[in-house]
Image: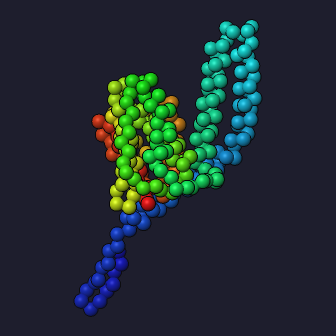
């Protein structure tokens, strides 16, 4: 608010700075992601090297017939090493320093290219994955990043549901934007997590890292897109709007 005195009293001018504050909040958030990514890049090499060595010896042990009684334990240790490597990869995906390949792309083709993989998981768990792909224009994106976003968000939706429920992946045109919609029939996002959804390490999963949606928000930003969502006890809908 600005106040200007005059002979008749005071002239007050009010300015709505909501957008400015939201922009500042967004910049602080992405600065935090960048720091996490840079830290991860710095330690990834040092952590992965010994893990690779340990995994190599465990794989040799798994083929040793004299150690067959320990195969279950060895397999479990290999799986846990793979899990650590996956967490490191998630950290690295928060870095903005990766080389990118932005091309004019069809969102529908990107979706259909990974659909068989996701459908296999859905069928195995007794869940349904449905596509409803509209008549949309091509957009300029990094296809690898969009595939990663889709895999994270659709797998999250499948994780949130019981058998017999469905996930709908939909695309459509809205004014000057191409919209990707992912809608599930899960139990919704817990109320205490809603405000912190894009924040790293915030998760409602017992075994989650809390990095998946942070990565998705970062990918959306790099590809000129915005994410919003609506959630209730009947499910959650994420809308990703790509400016054309």
Q: Quadrant of the N terminus?
A: bottom left
Q: Please indicate, yes or no, whether residue 173 appears anywhere in the rendered image.
A: yes
Q: Position of residue 148 (x, y in %)?
A: 53, 43
The color scheme shown is rainbow
Q: Who is closer to the viewer here, 17 or 227?
A: 227
Q: Position of residue 240 (x, y in %)?
A: 41, 50
Q: Is residue 48 left or right of residue 156?
A: right
**Residue appearing at x 72%, y 41% in the figure:** 45
Q: Is residue 83 left or right of residue 67?
A: left
Q: Position of residue 76 (x, y in %)?
A: 62, 20
Q: Please indicate, yes or no, whether residue 228 appears anywhere in the rendered image.
A: no
Q: Picture quarter containing residue 51?
A: top right
Q: Is residue 111 left or right of residue 73?
A: left
Q: Picture quarter containing residue 174?
A: bottom left
Farthest bottom residue in view: 7
Q: Quadrant of the C terminus?
A: bottom left
Q: Answer above or below: position of 140 versus 17.
A: above
**Residue appearing at x 38%, y 61% in the figure:** 176
Q: Position of residue 140 (x, y in %)?
A: 51, 57
Q: How many marks?
A: 0
**Residue appearing at x 64%, y 16% in the figure:** 73
Q: Who is closer to the viewer here, 233 or 216?
A: 216
**Residue appearing at x 74%, y 25% in the figure:** 56
């Amino acid at each position: 608010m600005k106040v200007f005195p005059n002979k008749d009293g005071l002239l007050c001018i009010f300015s709505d700075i909501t957008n400015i504050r939201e922009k500042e909040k967004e910049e602080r958030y992405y600065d935090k992601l960048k720091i996490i990514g840079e830290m991860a890049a710095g330690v990834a090499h040092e952590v992965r090297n010994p893990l690779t060595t340990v995994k190599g010896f465990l794989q040799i042990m798994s083929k040793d017939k004299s150690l067959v009684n320990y195969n279950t334990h060895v397999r479990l240790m290999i799986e846990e090493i793979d899990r650590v490597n996956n967490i490191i990869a998630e950290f690295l995906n928060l870095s903005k320093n990766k080389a990118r390949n932005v091309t004019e792309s069809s969102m529908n083709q990107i979706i259909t290219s990974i659909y068989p993989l996701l459908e296999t998981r859905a069928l195995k768990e007794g869940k349904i994955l449905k596509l409803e792909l509209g008549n949309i224009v091509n957009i300029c994106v990094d296809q690898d990043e969009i595939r990663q976003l889709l895999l994270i968000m659709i797998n999250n939706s499948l994780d949130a549901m019981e058998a017999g429920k469905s996930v709908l992946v939909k695309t459509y045109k809205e004014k000057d934007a191409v919209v990707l919609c992912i809608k599930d029939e899960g139990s919704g996002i817990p109320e205490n997590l809603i405000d912190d959804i894009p924040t790293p390490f915030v998760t409602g999963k017992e075994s989650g890292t809390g990095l998946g949606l942070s990565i998705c928000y970062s990918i959306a930003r790099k590809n000129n897109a915005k994410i919003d969502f609506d959630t209730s006890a009947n499910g959650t809908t994420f809308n990703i709007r790509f400016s054309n």
